[in-house]
Amino acid sequence: MEFGPHLMLAVLEGAVTAAVLALMASGLSLVFGVMRVVNVAHGQFFMLGAVLAWAVSSAVSSALGGGAFGFVAAVLLAPVIAGALAVAADLTVLKRVGYDPERTIVATIGLLYILQQAALMTYGPEARPVAPPFNDRLALPWVAFGPEGPRLIWPWGLSITSYKLFVMGAAAAVLAGLWALMTRTGIGLVMRATQLDRETAQAFGIPVERVYAGVFGLGAALAALAGVLIVPIQQAHYLMGGDALLLSFIVVIIGGLGSLGGTVIAALLIGLSDGIVSVFFSPTLAKILATLLVALVLVFRPEGLRGKAAR
Amino acid sequence: MRGGRIIGLHLGLIAVLFALNFLLPAYSHGTVARVMVLATYAMGYNILFGYTGLLSLGHAMFFAAGMYGLAMPMTHLGLGAGPALLTGIGAAAVLSLGVGLLALRTRGVAFMIVTLMFAQAAWLTILLAGRWTRGDEGVVIPQADRVLLGLDLSDPQTRYLAALALFSAVLFGTLWLVRQPMGRVLVAIRENEDRAELLGYDTFRHKLGAVVLSGTVSGAAGAAYGLFFGYAGASFAETHYSIFPLLWVLLGGAGTVIGPFLGTLFMFYLIDLASGLTPAYMLIAGVALVLLTLFAPQGLAGEIRRRWWRGLP
Amino acid sequence: MPVTKTDAAPRSPARRSAIKTLAAAAAGTASLPLWARYAGAESAAPIRIGFQMHATGIGAAYGRWYDRTTRAALRLINEAGGINGRPVELVTEDDGTDPKRGAEVVEKFASLHRCDVGYGTLFSHVVMGSAPRAGELKLPYFVVSEGHHVASGALNRWTLQPGITDVKSQVLAMAPFVRENLGRKVTMIFPDYAFGHDHRDFFSEAIEAQGGEVVAKLAIPPTETSFTKYFAKIPRETEVIYHVMVGPSVLTFVKEMGEFFGPSRPEIFGFIDSLESVDLQSPGLDFLEGTYFWEGMPRYVQPDQTEFDRHYRAAIGIDENGALAADPSDVSAYAHMFGCWETLYVIKAGMEACGYRGPDDRAALVEAVEAMTEMPLSNEHPQGAKLFNGRTHQVFGPQYISKVENGRLVVQAETPIEAGFYPDEVDYTTQSL
């Protein structure tokens, strides 16, 4: 493929990765920012979203005879179920260990094992697809400069699908909604107050424990939603949470703790660098270089792109 | 007086492990040998995490550096086991120095992520160098080459005692370290880095020392693992091999000398016994971890320290 | 994984059908008087086969089918009187598809469970991690991995692969077909794993010998979940794409390949590993129509189906589309799992040939298997006639090339055994036992 169209393709693909990553990482960032704990099981809620999407959509499709209903039902139900599960985990375990950072790591590793094994036993070891509600291949044009001036051409292989465009739009809409929730509503104010200073918030009568449970549930729901959106592109598999966790973890720290804007910028940085670097190098070398590039951003800007020093 | 008791406890552990060499049935004998090597890895991790308070998520790269630093020269240059053990340890030392110099510019969670990403890059590099490393499949170190100072390490007795020797050396090394001024400064950094700095200590150099020591011990464990069990593979460089030592140390008790061994042993038998009961053994392991954080938050050795013996190092 | 006997309660989804077959088996054996069932045995103690199963981890989708095939074969073996008049018992341990745990499991078989042999490993890295321990513990270790590790000489005299051909042999047999029927300029896409590197090296060499050429080699890192950006690196002159992927992202890979090329694709030849255990009717796979696959054994029943394939399918409970008869959405790992079946019959034949009595005869068992050569097409070898090479511990057999027609794989060619031959790289029989 020509260099220009190749780069454009890589950027588009990177943008899809970035969209899903931003959604998932915003959930982790919220938990990390407000509660100051690392949820190692966050990737499992992503997996849970994907697996539930398969379960819901195949159940609905067999009841209503296919169509987009299954997918719509999955978008609505899967995040709610995952969120409810997370709230339950918060109330039974995390609350009782007092949100101690180290104990939370071990407890959520335990939770990770439990969710993963439960998925293996009920859903099974296969990767299963969910049919996208729509999936048209859209060939994309490119401007070529010939002897008789610029003209539009349709390069071989340069295309995207309508579903991938939808994923980008949906992620942007949800993130905008989340931003509005955090900055424009009373709930957001309460969350930000808790994030700033837990003791003071408590003194002002904010029910900190309920805020924590809600934030943990919301974080998990966002991961699950990312899982639902990705599953028509990637399929659900019980081990898919691991790498997703690592990536979103990286995004959160690069973005700067608890900064939603930073998280989105970092997701774009990682998604696009992954795509663009792949144009110039062999795939595995590209992965190594993209990883080191992002690590060095952190080394030379330890406080992340935005936000205060990560201590 | 207290010092004597502490030395006695650890000598006692070594003596028990030595006696077990003659008492254990074949399967547990092999298992305890393996656990001692992995506990050495966990002790290396504990130097950085338990005593210095730096949480790394990338120690698998040091373990793998030791393992490949040993296996590559043995496979491709025909180096003997003794010198290869040294190249393995050396590779881990060099890597930990390089990683330390960069990663220590960060603190806290940023340090976790930077180490995680360096380890990810290291793992991918092993795959990229598949021509020499055979990627994920790894390389077998032939039985005939696994002879150290005339001792055949594929022999169960020899392997057990060699593992015990490595384990004891690192155990007493750690014990000695935490009683040195260097060890005290590390604990001071863990408790309050700014204050340690105000008191005039060069915290960066101390932390760098801790990273190099921790990485080198982890690498020694990796090299020994390759030599004792005859295999080096990329799976040992994957992320979950970075999480394991964290888990073992937290389970056993961070910042205790004996904790890493207890945690490693506990985790091994938890999985091994649970897998004999049900195919869903990871479920049991998960529940056990959750219960442990609820009821023994300081880990096993931490619980001993809290309840019975406040002076346990 | 628990220590389970062959007849222990099966695990979910196939439970109903399995219980039915189980009941039939129990009724069959129970109708015989006790003494008649294992008559003539010096000892009625069971022979214990340690099954190293990928029940969890990345290999779990394969592991489930290896388990089903193994249980079906052992049920038949026991119904027919066991081995040397003794019943055969399966001791299953999960290795988590991890080399470290694999080595521990081998130790458990040899030292704790007192197994007679270890058996059943698929993923190459688990084989590599486990084989040294099997050699030290002198436990015959029968792998079903299709890796080239055994025949390359990297392992030891105790490790054998008598039930499935290795990747080198498979690739060598494919090159002439690709060159003659599909095209000359090939782009290879494979995982950046040793398994993928074997494909790259062996196929490049083989296609060049045929007058073809590999114009690009794309090694995909294993963590990758999106592939479109790499397809752009496929040179425009490519006439054939050769793909072999493994892991949970394979479906994405194939689907995105279809979306990338749209209506104008080159010829595509893949190893079914890319879609093993995956329903070809899955959404997004329609573009595979008209593409070619290597198959170890044809998943869909062919017009010239042998009675042996019929017998084999019926025993495991597989329908004509290669899926579980009780649940047609549960598609089997048909191209690989025959290796389990055939390996178990090789173990049986080896034990019978050396009059195997117990662990003291393990060395004799290895020698007995090394002495094997021809394995005719039969109920014991339903995939095809085979030739075992006792020096390299590797079996050789036919390969199948199928084309997707109306969403089914239709066999186009069966390559002869000789097409997969290559010079010996090791002689294990010179090593001491």
Image (spheres, coloured by chain):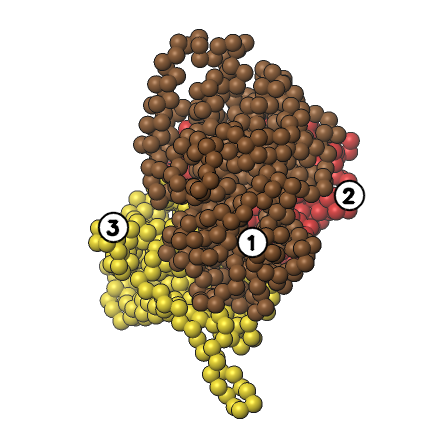
The chain letter of the brown chain reads C
The residue that mark 3 highlights is A62
Position of C219 with respect to A266 (left or right) is right
Residue A142 percent location from the top left of the image: 48, 79
The residue lying at 47 percent from left, 40 percent from top is: C304
Chain identifier of the yellow chain: A
Q: Nearer the viewer, mark 3 or mark 1?
A: 3
Q: Are the residues under badges 3 and 1 in a single subunit? A: no
* Rendering quarter of residue A146: bottom right
Viewer-nearest residue: B110 or B308 = B110
Q: Quadrant of the N terminus of chain B?
A: top right
**Kind of element beneath mark 2:** loop
Q: What's the residue at 53%, 68% (across, down)?
A: C232
Closer to the eye: label 2 or 3: 3
Give residue C213's quadrant in the image. bottom right
Residue A74, image x, y percentages: 28, 56
Given the image, on which type of amino acid does mark 2 rest? Leu
Q: Is residue C186 above or below residue B132?
A: below
Q: Colour of chain B?
A: red
Work out whether disc 1 and disc 2 sit on a shared chain: no
Q: CA distance from mark 1 to mark 2?
A: 31 Å
* Residue for point 52% across, 11% down: C41
For residue B79, the mark is 2
Secondary structure of the residue carrying tag 3 is helix
Q: Which residue is mark 1?
A: C191
The chain under label 3 reads A
Q: Amino acid at mark 1?
A: Pro
